[in-house]
Image (cartoon, rainbow, N blue to C red):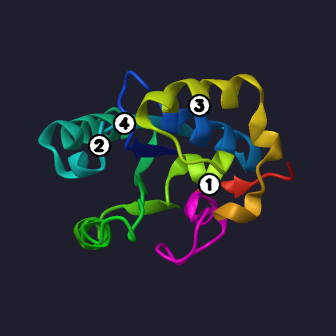
Amino acid sequence: MSIQLIIAVEANKESKSDYRYIDPFIKRYFKIGTNKISYVYMGSKRNYSDKGIKNQITSLINSYRKTGESHVIYCFDTDDFSVSPEHQANDEKIKKDLVHNSDIVWFNRDIEEVFINSRLENAEKKSKSIDFLAKGLIKSVSYQLFTYEDDFVGKRRSNLGVVISKYLEKSSE
């Protein structure tokens, strides 16, 4: 039986910048087969509990129910705690709110820093992600960056590989 991974990302639907990093990562490092990957664009980290976002997720789950089971994965940047300690408090709240019914992927400090080793202004994120995808730069990204289970420690790391491997078989690349 197939599964559906519903990946909720911080980026908005217009930008789709997070998708352009995560999707090539999954396709490079995992066997998708007949499984389905669906994306929900939250538009902001704080929208994870928004009724509209929850409705989109529920709709995806219901439409896949006859095919197989669905698993929800929320993807968040940890942001920089040294700039604003409230970021850590917000992340702890998210973790507490979502711990029972979904998985959480963290990018420390943000998705661009993990994938392209660069901190970007919001205005740059869409164009840089388009370049990343178009140039096939996923080939230069080490899988090791995505194998950390401690979500708030260190820079340029994530648990994306750990979470996805719970549901999909790792490919031989």
- Callout 1 crowding tier (Cα within 10 Å): few <14, some 14–19, many ≥20: many
Q: Nearer the viewer, mark 1 or mark 4?
A: 1
Tell me what residue is drawn at x 64 percent, y 60 percent: 161
Using the rendered image of the protein, determine whether residue 1 is visible from the camera's viewpoint: no
- Callout 4 crowding tier (Cα within 10 Å): few <14, some 14–19, many ≥20: many
Q: Earlier in the sequence, mark 1 or mark 4?
A: 4
User: Which is nearer the eye, 147 or 109?
Assistant: 109
Query: Pointers 3 and 1 in contact (CB under 8 A)?
Result: no
User: Label 3 to label 1, Cα distance in Å?
Assistant: 12 Å
Query: Pointers 1 and 4 in contact (CB under 8 A)?
Result: no
Tell me what residue is drawn at x 58 percent, y 42 percent: 22
Q: Earlier in the sequence, mark 1 or mark 2?
A: 2
Hey, what amino acid is under mark 3? Ser
Tell me what residue is drawn at x 50 percent, y 30 percent: 124
**Is 149 part of what is drawn in magenta?**
yes
User: Label 3 to label 4, Cα distance in Å?
Assistant: 17 Å
Look at mark 2 in the image and give the residue it sits on: 44
12 is higher (above) or lower (below) than 25: above
Hey, what amino acid is under mark 4? Val
Look at mark 3 in the image and give the residue it sits on: 129
Res 40 label: 4
Q: Magenta residues: mostly which secondary structure?
A: loop
- Find numbered disc 3 in the image and state the secondary structure of the residue it sits on: helix
User: Label 2 to label 4, Cα distance in Å?
Assistant: 11 Å
User: Label 1 to label 4, Cα distance in Å?
Assistant: 21 Å
Percent coordinates x, y for residue 130 in the rendering: 61, 24
Percent coordinates x, y for residue 158 in the rendering: 57, 63
52 is higher (above) or lower (below) than 156: above
